[in-house]
């Protein structure tokens, strides 16, 4: 299957994993709604919704850049309406936008706590809710959320309680949606990388993780493409890991995804060895 002619509403698509997923879908000839806040170049983070849209068009897709703050219901509503007006509907929702702050309880300012809860859990829920009327009309509707397999292992909560709660909250949304929408044929799945992914946002953590310990966002994008081209009624309620998805597609040589050739990437959070 191909994503040609389908419309993807991708949050946080101006850079990183979101943009990589957009570019992979664009190669099929998909329509991409670049839903993100960045309309002007950030001092430390390159890329805007407009530069991402240009790249998507160059890759063979159609693009609609829209300024969206996933914390703002009106912003989301306006964007989904514009997407449907432009492309005739929405087939796929990618909940990629996320805020991160790896700090303990005493070191987490409440404004950062609120940001993670509002972007990660509330934003994921609000975007999916706004897109739901369009998904119900789509031929092969998918919801794909960038979140880890659910876990209650204390070792993931102890070091950064707030961030872990916010990411697990996204995963619990997936768990619920898979059951809620099963009978109407809307797939709800999660995708998480086996290793740390090299993104501009990673640099905001102060350079504590080097490129040689990362993989490129393309590995997540290729895994997402494999998931989104499956029949929705036959593929829901899964918590996928990127390299496992690719292995089932016959792709086992992952050296091309290395941030630095020949390097050994670090395992991402929330995954046991």
Image (tube, rainbow, N blue to C red):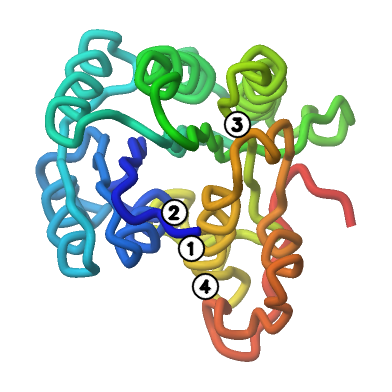
Query: Residue beneath label 1, please?
Result: 217
Q: Residue at x 18, y 53 (%)?
A: 62
Q: Residue at x 42, y 24 (%)?
A: 135
State which quadrant residue 149 falls in.
top right
Nearest to viewer (mark 2 / mark 4): 2
x and y, in percent, of residue 121 in the image: 53, 19
Nearest to viewer (mark 4 / mark 1): 1
Disc 2 from disc 3: Cα separation = 21 Å
State which quadrant residue 261 falls in.
bottom right
Q: Residue at x 20, y 30 (%)?
A: 83
In the image, 260 versus 148, the foreground residue is 148
C-beta proximity under 8 Å, tags 4 and 3: no
x and y, in percent, of residue 1 in the image: 50, 59
Nearest to viewer (mark 2 / mark 3): 3
Q: Which mark is residue 129?
A: none
Q: Residues within 10 Å of mark 2 (few under 14, many from 20)?
A: many
Query: Residue beneath label 2, please?
Result: 17
- Residue 152 against residue 22 in the figure, above or below: above
Query: Residue beneath label 3, please?
Result: 187
């Amino acid at each position: 299957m191909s994503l040609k002619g389908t419309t993807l509403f991708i949050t946080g698509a101006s850079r990183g994993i979101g943009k990589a997923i957009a570019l992979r879908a664009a190669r099929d000839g998909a329509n991409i709604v670049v839903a993100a806040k960045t309309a002007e170049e950030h001092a430390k983070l390159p890329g805007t919704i407009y530069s991402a849209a240009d790249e998507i068009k160059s890759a063979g897709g159609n693009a609609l850049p829209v300024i969206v703050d996933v914390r703002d219901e009106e912003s989301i509503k306006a964007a989904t309406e514009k997407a449907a007006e432009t492309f005739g509907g929405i087939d796929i929702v990618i909940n990629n936008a996320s805020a991160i702050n790896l700090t303990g309880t005493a070191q987490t300012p409440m404004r950062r706590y609120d940001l993670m809860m509002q972007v990660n859990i509330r934003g994921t829920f609000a975007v999916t809710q706004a897109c739901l009327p369009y998904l119900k009309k789509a031929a092969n509707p998918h919801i794909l959320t960038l979140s880890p397999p659910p876990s209650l292992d204390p070792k993931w909560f102890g070091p950064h309680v707030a961030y872990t709660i916010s990411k697990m909250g996204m995963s619990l949304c997936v768990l619920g949606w898979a059951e809620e929408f099963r009978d109407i044929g809307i797939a709800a799945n999660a995708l998480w990388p086996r290793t740390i992914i090299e993104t501009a946002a990673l640099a905001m953590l102060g350079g504590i993780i080097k490129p040689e310990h990362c993989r490129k966002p393309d590995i997540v994008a290729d895994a997402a493409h494999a998931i989104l081209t499956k029949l929705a009624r036959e593929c829901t309620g899964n918590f996928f890991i990127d390299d496992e998805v690719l292995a089932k597609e016959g792709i086992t040589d992952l050296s091309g995804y290395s941030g630095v050739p020949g390097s050994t990437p670090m395992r991402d959070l929330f995954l046991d060895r």
